Image (spheres, rainbow, N blue to C red):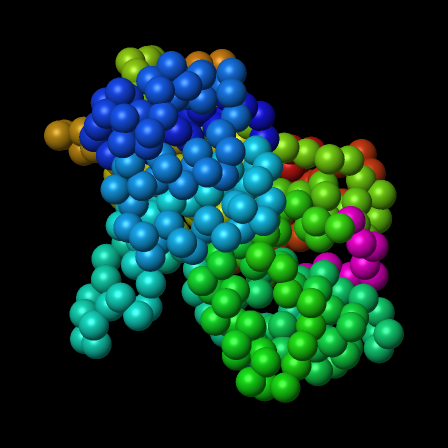
Amino acid sequence: MNRSELGAALRALRNASGREAKAVARGAVMSASKLSKIETGKLGPSADDVDRVLTALGVPEDVKSEYMDAARAAATEATAWRLIQRAGLHKAQRQLRPDEVADGTTVVGSPSSSSTLPSLVLRMWQQLDVRPGQRVLEIGTGTGYSTALGAHHLGDGNLTSVEYDPVVGGAAASAIKAAGYAPRLIIGDGLRGDPDGVAYDRLIATCSVRYIPVPWLHQVKPGRPHDRPPRPTLALLPGEERPSGIDPEIIDTWAGSWVAQLAAPSAERMGVGAEQILWDVSTGSQSRTTPRPDGGWTVVQRGPARLWDQVETAVRSWQAVGEPHQEGFGITVSAARQRVWIGTEGGPGWDLPI
């Protein structure tokens, strides 16, 4: 992560708070000039800077404390970036944890994580085909159920599990200990694998990814390092309009959203139903759909990548073969490319960005 990304995160936090930069600087006991340098990427904030800014933005102490211990233990730019991002999203999107919801209350929104069906967890471990004595890296500790199964099968010393959310990871650690196991547990960014760069025989991931992160391949097979592109604040801008050839709601379905992500892997999807927004941060391209009063939908696109064109083509290819579930897809990974296909390797497919 570079300093411009840190600045973008700080700007997003400032915007979420509804405060001007000078007010944030005063509240953080920080000069406006220093805040400006952080926002423009000329200066990277320390862990103490992050702490003061979160306090000035009004982030609750119980939320802030979830992240600050990790920041002080490893006060790197990447750590500061993720602390800012997580705390900002927590505040702006009103994320809820299970113990914050009263019994019988209906919660509206999209889950950031969920407990995997136990039978699916077992099937994943079976497909991993791991043998006694082999070492496994698990990405996504979650509830700890999968981790405990792995520790039971392999022994504590042969399993390492990485969890991004410190609260989830803490609860999992307690549950795993209560079950009588003690594998190596790490709070960190699973996309980067084991921070110590240890080599493993197998890797199992219980989280979703847009492509196979290259650090994973590096820790199981040789690979190359990779970083995410910067993420500025989204501003919807005018562009070229045309009718949409598909119903935008199709990408609200599990399989439809999967196909759309394959078609535009660098794009972030927002919106819902007939009003979808696709945004490719790396190129500045964006597409958005709206329903038309007389029926059908309009899509507005701008930027070098015509995101909705890519999604339409992919969705039509998927529909042409009967809209199969994700189980009907496969993936081929080589040193030169990663390709997801439908049915067989020669069927319709998409290269993943590596």
| Magenta extent | 197-204
Where the N terminus falls, by quadrant? top right
Q: Is residue 349 left or right of residue 41?
A: right
x, y percentage for residue 2?
58, 25
Q: Main secondary structure of the magenta part?
A: loop
Q: Is residue 286 left or right of residue 25?
A: right
In this view of the protein, which residue sits in the foreground, 322 or 173?
A: 173
Q: Residue at x 77, y 77 (%)?
A: 154
x, y percentage for residue 93?
29, 45
In this view of the protein, which residue sits in the foreground, 329 or 21?
A: 21
Q: Is residue 5 above or below residue 85?
A: above
x, y percentage for residue 189?
59, 48
x, y percentage for residue 56?
29, 36
Asked if residue 202 lies in the magenta stretch, the reply is: yes
In this view of the protein, which residue sits in the foreground, 210 or 153?
A: 153
Number of disc labels: 0
Q: Residue at x 37, y 37 (%)?
A: 52
Q: Residue at x 46, y 43 (%)?
A: 83
- Asked if residue 47 shows in the view, the reply is yes
Q: Is residue 73 left or right of residue 346?
A: left
Q: Residue furthest left?
A: 293
Q: Is residue 207 above or below residue 1?
A: below
Classify residue 140 by image quadrant.
bottom right
Q: Residue at x 72, y 43 (%)?
A: 215
Classify residue 74 by image quadrant.
top right
